[in-house]
Amino acid sequence: MPIVHVAAAALVDADGRVLVAQRPVGKPMGGLWEFPGGKLEPGETPEDALRRELREELGIELCCVAPAGFASHAYDTFHLILMLFITREWDGSPHGAPIRWLRPHELYALPMPPADLPLLPQLEAMLG
């Protein structure tokens, strides 16, 4: 089974809320909410992939990121390694995909991809 590496971001605003984006309907897991990010391209670092993906998806430029946790999940046709980074600084206002800003404990109520779920307690512990 192929291994897919994905970098995702927990953007945290001044009120301690986290941004989640909705996956496009018609794509795999469409309509679910997730931490924004995407697959690493060959030779790309997780941080570079994250900057590229958030520029493309949300129209923002990340200033600095720090590792926040990771998850490993076996889907039917591939195994996903999801690396979550946290940031409180970016340039621009997120736009494009449907987004929501929620407190960490509110994320549990959202329908999310299975790989994202183990990251919720990790994030909640970090943000208190």
Image: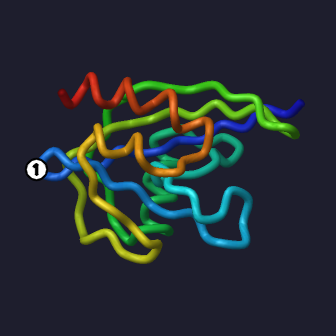
Residue 14 vs 54, above or below: the answer is above
Pick the residue in front: 35 or 59.
35
Give coordinates of residue 6: x percent, y percent.
Answer: 60, 41
Residue at numbered disc 1? 15
Q: Is residue 45 left or right of residue 16?
A: right
Question: Quadrant of the image for the C terminus?
Answer: top left
Crowd around label 1: few <14 · some 14–19 · many ≥20 (10 Å): few
Give coordinates of residue 127: x percent, y percent.
Answer: 21, 31
Residue drawn at (85%, 34%) of the image? 2
| Location of residue 123 (image quadrant) | top left
Residue drawn at (45%, 61%) of the image? 21
Q: Is residue 26 left or right of residue 77?
A: left
Helix or strand or loop: what does disc 1 sit on?
A: loop
Give coordinates of residue 12: x percent, y percent.
Answer: 23, 47
Residue drawn at (50%, 55%) of the image? 33
Give coordinates of residue 77: x percent, y percent.
Answer: 87, 40
Question: Quadrant of the image for the N terminus?
Answer: top right
Pick the residue in front: 66 or 98.
98
The number of numbered discs placed on residues in the rendered structure image is: 1
Q: Amino acid at mark 1?
A: Asp
